[in-house]
Image: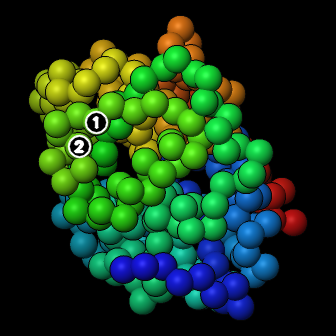
């Protein structure tokens, strides 16, 4: 379904849980850009409740999502933009608010002009790891590839991409439930990718790819950060440190507040 932008409506942005835990800078800059594009704009940093649903705590999930929906309704959000694939599916199932993936939306509103072609001279060749939870959302996949093309990065596709993608090893709460199985899935996923330099659009996937033995960057690292070259190392795996992750969430929340003042 094609997204129709109506700037008379109030759009909201929700970065999810893992992205703020990983990169407050990416959250802040994305929020600031969306705030420039949409005259009526709000942002919410909160958990959608997907983990509670994944472990079968359905009543708790309904309670938490109702609390989130109330926050959205309190600021009159007409349509929501999410950066998290799990949030996208959760909103589609549980919320009356129309919800769009950030990766579907950016090709429609465009990237800032100064970012177009910024990486055209980079020598790195990326492989894309598509999030398994949205393996059937073709427009989302197309959007990710459009962004990389606009930036000027070179990409080689894996056999197991788009609708054929494989789990990174983080899904279904398997990491806390059965770490050895999670580690096996992470390594298997890396073995199916064409290069050892991977682009993801989920911070949890990035952590898994790193644990599986490859180098990984989040797509927003490439959008807002410096140009990446073949010799460069990826950012550290912050999600493996709960303390750093929670500190980053706090920084992201403050960054959102600053971006929409």
Per the image, label 1 sits on a secondary structure element best described as: loop
For disc 2, the marked residue is 161
- From the viewer's perspective, is 176 left or right of 40? left
Q: Which colour scheme is used?
A: rainbow
Total number of numbered discs in the rendering: 2
- Which label lies toward us, 1 or 2? 1
Q: In which quarter of the image is the C terminus?
A: bottom right
* Residue drawn at the location 23% of the way across and 43% of the way down: 161
Quadrant in the rendering for residue 165: top left
Q: Establish if 108 lies above or below 259.
A: below
146 left or right of 151 in image: left
Viewed as shown, does residue 35 lie left or right of 210? right
**145 or 38: nearer the viewer:** 145
Residue ID at (83%, 56%): 258
CA separation, marks 1 and 2? Answer: 7 Å
Confirm or deny contact between disc 1 and disc 2 (CB under 8 A). Answer: yes
Q: How crowded is mark 2: few (under 14 residues within 10 Å), some or many (20 or more)?
A: some
Q: Along the line of sight, which residue is nearer the eye, 106 or 66?
A: 106
Identify the residue position indicated by label 1 in the image: 157
Do we see residue 253 in this rendering? no
Q: Position of residue 164 (x, y in %)?
A: 15, 48
Which x, y percent locates residue 233? 53, 13
Q: Residue at x 46, y 64 (%)?
A: 104
Q: Residue at x 63, y 61 (%)?
A: 110
């Amino acid at each position: 379904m094609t997204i129709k932008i109506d700037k008379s409506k109030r759009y909201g942005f929700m970065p999810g849980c893992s992205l703020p835990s990983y990169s407050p800078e990416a959250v802040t800059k994305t929020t600031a850009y969306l705030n420039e594009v949409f005259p009526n704009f709000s942002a919410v940093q909160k958990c959608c409740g997907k983990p509670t649903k994944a472990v079968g705590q359905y009543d708790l999930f309904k309670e938490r999502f109702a609390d989130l929906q109330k926050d959205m309704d309190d600021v009159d959000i007409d349509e929501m933009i999410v950066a998290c694939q799990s949030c996208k599916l959760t909103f589609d199932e549980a919320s009356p608010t129309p919800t769009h993936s950030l990766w579907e939306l950016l090709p429609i509103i465009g990237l800032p002009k100064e970012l177009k072609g910024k990486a055209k001279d980079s020598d790195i060749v990326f492989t894309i790891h598509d999030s398994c939870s949205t393996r059937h959302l073709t427009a989302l996949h197309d959007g990710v590839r459009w962004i990389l093309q606009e930036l000027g990065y070179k990409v080689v596709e894996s056999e197991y991409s788009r609708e054929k993608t494989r789990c990174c090893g983080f899904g279904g709460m398997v990491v806390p439930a059965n770490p050895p199985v999670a580690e096996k899935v992470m390594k298997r996923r890396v073995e199916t990718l064409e290069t050892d330099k991977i682009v993801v659009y989920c911070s949890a996937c990035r952590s898994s790819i790193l644990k599986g033995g490859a180098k990984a960057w989040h797509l927003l690292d490439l959008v807002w950060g410096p140009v990446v070259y073949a010799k460069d190392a990826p950012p550290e795996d912050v999600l493996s440190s709960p303390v750093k992750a929670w500190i980053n969430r706090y920084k992201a929340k403050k960054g959102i507040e600053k971006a929409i003042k």
